[in-house]
Amino acid sequence: MEMTRVIARRFNERYGPIFPVPDALVTAAPEVPGLDGRKMSKSYGNAIALSMTADETVAAIRRARTDQDRRITFDPEHRPGVSVLLSTAALCLDVAPEELADDIGDGGSGELKKVTATAVNHFLAPLRERRRGFAADGEIVRSVLRRGNEHARAIADATLDEVREAMGTVY
């Protein structure tokens, strides 16, 4: 992202305002934590995939590490496993992790994992249904890709024409 910003700024300074300088769009969760506290990644084996069934999601969340303390609190520094599950569930439920921790209270890690699995499965259900539809009909995906490719090509051609004009390389 930063490299793109530098290139756009330098080009614009030299040839005029052609490229927009991109800004980062940071959400409430710029990085979704994996079930082990690291960045969620398929290669780490800590991800919840859209291709998972609800039961597979429950099993993955049950395997997440927590601690022995029965009282559920949000403390990323001292209780990373519990905090990851609270953050994940809170994102799906659109509540603060601290609020969710208070709701669970002395329910323990079993209750936390149950709440997290339910929240994740409820949040992902419409996305998983849509994914199944795309997987069942590959022509829909190919059609969307074709249209997107045509649209991107038209924009790129127009931008390249502007770049050539600004640089004086129009032949």
Image: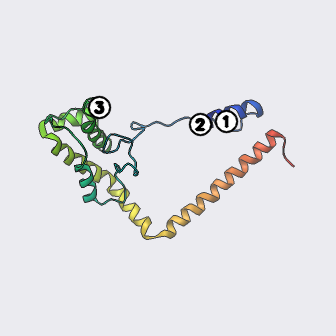
Of 60 and 4, nearer the camera is: 60
Q: Residues within 10 Å of mark 3 (few under 14, many from 20)?
A: some
Residue in the picture at 21% in, 46% down: 113
Badge number at residue 76? 3
Q: Point out residue 100 in the picture as x, y percentages from the top left corner.
A: 23, 37
Amino acid, disc 2? Pro
Quadrant occupied by the N terminus = top right
Of 96 and 48, nearer the camera is: 48
Q: Point out residue 88 in the picture as x, y percentages from the top left corner.
A: 31, 42
* Disc 2: which residue: 22
* Disc 1: which residue: 8
Q: Earlier in the sequence, mark 3 or mark 2?
A: 2
Q: Report which quarter residue 95 is drawn in.
A: top left
Which element is circle 3 on? loop
**Residue most toward the right?**
171
**Residue most toward the front?**
44
Q: Report which quarter residue 4 is drawn in.
A: top right
Q: Earlier in the sequence, mark 3 or mark 1?
A: 1
Measured Cα–Cα span from mark 3 to mark 2: 31 Å
Q: Earlier in the sequence, mark 2 or mark 1?
A: 1
- Horizontally, is 16 left or right of 85 in the view? right
Residue 76, compared with residue 63, is above or below; it is above
Amino acid, disc 1? Ala
- Horizontally, is 134 left or right of 105 in the view? right
Amino acid, disc 3? Pro
Q: Residues within 10 Å of mark 2 (few under 14, many from 20)?
A: few
Measured Cα–Cα span from mark 3 to mark 1: 37 Å
Question: Does the residue at mark 2 contact the one at mark 1 (Cβ under 8 Å)?
Answer: yes
Which element is circle 1 on? helix
Q: Please say which color scheme the image uses.
A: rainbow
Q: Point out residue 167 in the picture as x, y percentages from the top left corner.
A: 81, 39
Which element is circle 2 on? loop
